[in-house]
Image (cartoon, rainbow, N blue to C red):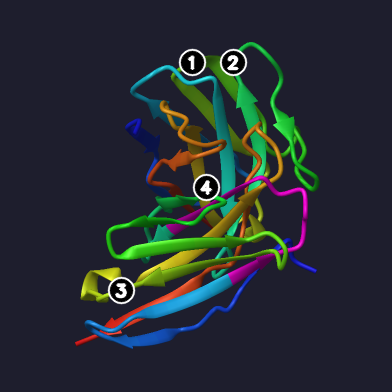
Amino acid sequence: SAVISQKPSRDICQRGTSLTIQCQVDSQVTMMFWYRQQPGQSLTLIATANQGSEATYESGFVIDKFPISRPNLTFSTLTVSNMSPEDSSIYLCSVEGPQRRSYNEQFFGPGTRLTVL
Amino acid sequence: RKEVEQDPGPFNVPEGATVAFNCTYSNSASQSFFWYRQDCRKEPKLLMSVYSSGNEDGRFTAQLNRASQYISLLIRDSKLSDSATYLCVCSTDSWGKLQFGAGTQVVVTP
């Protein structure tokens, strides 16, 4: 599977500020995904990031709050804008596996643990 | 109603024993199914895909029952290292949208 890194691994931020999370993959991938995992909850897909096109957001998530960049096939960023304590969560990027033994196998980065005060 | 439902557990399992648990999914159009494992404060890691005919990977066996819309995972000869939260995951399309269950916690005790 691909090696995925995320920066930062964790951060503590003040209400009203923004944080940009980076996701780097060691191989070219078509699709990258951003998820949120709130405390005690499971993962929720925020958006799908394809290179060369606008990200596709899931219901409940908007571009103004979570702008995404995908400048090339190995890198993506997610920004959490105008943060509030409700944004405290783990943010994870994922990519499809390079060998698609079945549809939709995804591999996750280590996550960014965000705390908003 | 959640799209993917799991018993949160915890399932307390003596080392060496067998444990099995299910998850149910509500969307009959679901095509792909997976079990992920998530350790505390870590990212989910793919444990195994679930195929229509059922499949086995070492001590782990996954089954799919489309008629009743559930997936099962069985762990034989449990190891202490099997302690984790097991996430049931379904997808209805080929474009990467995964629906995650909230997870079943398994605790293997000496």
User: Residues in magenta?
Assistant: B23-36
Among the two numbered marks 2 and 4 on one chain, the one whose residue lies closer to the N terminus:
2
Q: Nearer the viewer, mark 2 or mark 4?
A: 2
Among the two numbered marks 2 and 1 on one chain, the one whose residue lies closer to the N terminus:
2
Judging by the rendered image, the residue that carries numbered circle 4 is A91
Q: Position of residue A67 (x, y in %)?
A: 67, 30
Q: Nearer the viewer, mark 2 or mark 3?
A: 3
For the residues bearing labels 2 and 1, Cβ distance under 8 angstroms: yes
Q: Position of residue A25 (x, y in %)?
A: 39, 26
Q: Which residue type does callout 2 highlight?
A: Gln
Q: Which residue type does callout 1 highlight?
A: Leu
Judging by the rendered image, the residue that carries numbered circle 3 is B76
Judging by the rendered image, the residue that carries numbered circle 2 is A51
Answer yes or no: are tags 1 and 3 on the same subunit.
no
Q: Nearer the viewer, mark 1 or mark 3?
A: 3
Residue A14, can we see it?
Answer: no
For the residues bearing labels 1 and 4, Cβ distance under 8 angstroms: no
Query: Dot 4 surroundings within 10 Å: few (below 14), some, or many (20 or more)?
Result: many
Question: Disc 1 versus disc 3: distance between alpha carbons?
Answer: 40 Å
Q: Secondary structure at mark 4?
A: strand
